[in-house]
Image: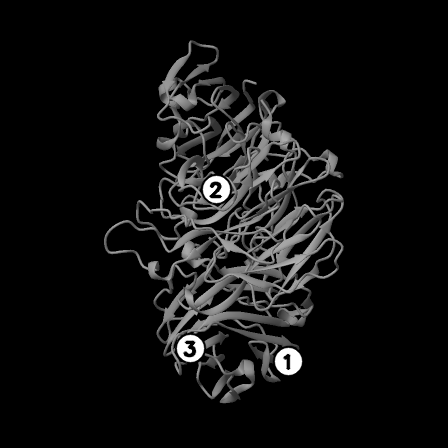
Amino acid sequence: MTPTIFRLHVCFWLAGWSAVAGGVSVQAAPETITFVANAENQTKPRVRYTGHAWVADQGGFLAGTGRGHRLLTEVAPDAGDFRVDLELALPAANREAALVLGGDSELVLAVGAKVWKLRGRFFRAGDAPLEIAAPVLNAGKSFSLAMERKGEIVAIFADGAVVHRGACSAAALGSLGLDPGTGTVRLYTLAASGAFATSRIGTKPFGNPFGMQLRRVPATSAAVYEPVVVRSALTNESSVLRLADSTLETYSVTKPASDSVTVERSRDGGLTWSEPQTAFTLPGRAYYALQVLAASDGARHAAVHVFGEGPGGYRGRLYEVYHTQLAAGATAWSPPQRIVPGYIGSIRGFIQLARSGRLVLAVARAIPAREQAPSSGPDYGWNDTFVYFSDDQGATWRQSYDVLSLELKTPNVTRYGAIEPVLLELRDGRVWMLVRDRQGRLVQSFSTDGERWSPLERTPFISSDSPAALLRLRDGKIVLLTNACQNWTDARSYAMGGREVLHAAISADEGKTWRGFREIFHETDVVSGGDRGTSYPTLAETSDGKVVVVSGQGEGKRAIVTFDPRWLEERAVRDELASGPAAWTQYGDEGLRAETAEGGARAVAIPLKATGLCGALWNFPISADGELRARIQIPAHAKAVRLSLNDHFNRIDDKRAAEHAVFTLEAAKIGLPADGRAHDLVLTWSRAQQTGEVLIRIDGKSPVHVAAARAAQFGVNYLRVEFRAEADAGHVTIDQLSAQLPR
């Protein structure tokens, strides 16, 4: 679900030069780090505590209580200009909390107070605190607080209004964070951009030593085939669409102001993009969620969040949906009008029906009475899915009589319920809805007209607690995007299975059968306490038949990706390694690389280490039947080697992944020796959807038969190699790897 929060941005903008030892100055490059985000989804914050740890709330914030129980960021900005933007709430009036700036400086604030206090050397107030007039704020209501330093002058803003301007120190802060003081602080998001010591900064965005980030972007859209990262995306949950003249447009909520929507345009198939421009302003602040569609009459319609406060939401907070349109030939968008009241999650499902021209919007809306789990009986979470539709191009909207609820069968971290629906019109006129669920599968509903809907039912699509995306191509095929990820060791992991990879599948028969389920986007290895993963995608088809995807969450993890949908339907795949191990992932392990094996062939080398699981995964097009060939070399120090064929992604440190795989092959039992020599391996599987079997041939010897542990959903699409080791030297190497699948 879209995190139920506003962002707390801490942005430090580099002045240009920072002091170093000996009086020599060097120019430091600005960096961006998200320290806290999406707390309800178990995202680990990049912070430390000086007392009790702050508690993650399903409302999307960290709650800290008690003087001295500080939340401090892992790193603080160096010397130079900076800007701090915060969004937080203080639930109780006249209870002081503090923004911590270094070892002895703080901004002491409270709602309902007449004055705020500035203490410490940062504010040139080492002898006595400075008092400034406090802004009028309400207890429990979120507010924005900004602090901007330029040279030796600091300005403080509350909800956009200047409350102080005066002298300050230009030195490095040393520390940054919040102290709850005599009250409680609700912290929604904390991010920093600016100058930090280079030794403290993580890997640059898309700097993975593995995965598709290794591929180079072709010079033209026509040359695009395998998925490539074109560039970073502006922000989370952007919406991409193609206009009638083939122009691509990407819309994003403008950050950090959050008071407008920004548009970027591409006229070369998504390889290059214009500078961001303001598309339209909002009648308030937004979070991230929006969807924009191109209508059949040439108009564009947008549905976007706007923050509010009052009853009918979540703890007095509202995320209401507003609609605006840019009529065909018009130069300005219409004034946004509220169409869905209450507290609405991420906006994913917004389409126009081809047959009737009806606009259909599906959203999840909070049910305040269900905020807490019931003491007995079924639990449907605190959201249901509602559908709204308009037959007059958005002038008026009606709500469907059908409210879609989803029972939560088992307890877990979150209780969202039926959320983040996506929509697609089928050839027979039905409307297909896919809804996010936390129980390992997407769920679905159908409608004949977008007005009446069938009850939700489980689908075979494997998914972590993440939303899907759908697109109809011009040739009639359907592309589905989903996070087919699971984590069997930790069912309460981030997003209940993870979002390390994003998969794409394609159907030529209206969803009856599917091919692909191939990885089109890998999360970067940037360490961040912010929201993470590859989820919340939107996609569009280019004029030359490529697919452009905007996806990813958190700083350094959002991207614009493009690929050719024909790549999803390949039936013969070879791991060429021309760009390195671009088709491999190794989340939960490290050190994967490509090297030259015996005979000069390029090989993947998976390093041994004496602690924890070692391994890597190779993704190929899904199939119920097929053959995989490779040469594999296992040194004697590698122990408990297991090969799995599976129908979903798992991290390498998922210790129970093999027992939940479709086929798991223990090297010792199938006769694959750990003798340091290369051996030919052939795996031939059949009837994977009917609990079939795999035949294993090693060096041409008689096959070993191994039955499937369970039926696959659509077939298998992963080779997982995992092992333990007695030494920190050596590698398991794999070369000449290929998969051959029936037509």
First reached walking from the N terminus: tag 2 or tag 3: 3
274 shown above or below 627: below
Q: Quarter holding the C terminus?
A: top right
Name the foreground residue: 151 vs 346: 346
Query: Which is in the foreground here, disc 1 or disc 2?
Result: 2
Q: Return the residue at label 1.
A: 152
Q: Which residue is drawn at 41% across and 81% down?
A: 96
Name the foreground residue: 445 vs 597: 445
Residue flagged by tag 1: what amino acid is it? Glu
110 shown above or below 665: below
Q: Return the residue at label 2.
A: 434
Residue 74: x %, y % from top left: 48, 63
Q: Return the residue at label 3.
A: 139
What element does badge 2 sit on? strand
Residue 168 seen anywhere in this rendered image of the structure: yes
Query: Which is in the foreground here, disc 2 or disc 3?
Result: 2
Residue flagged by tag 2: what amino acid is it? Leu
Neighbourhood count class around disc 2 (C-alpha, 10 Å): few under 14, some 14–19, many 20 upward: many
Name the foreground residue: 88 vs 608: 88
Residue 92: x %, y % from top left: 38, 77
Residue flagged by tag 3: what amino acid is it? Ala
- Give yes or no for contact between labels 3 and 1 (Cβ–Cβ under 8 Å): no
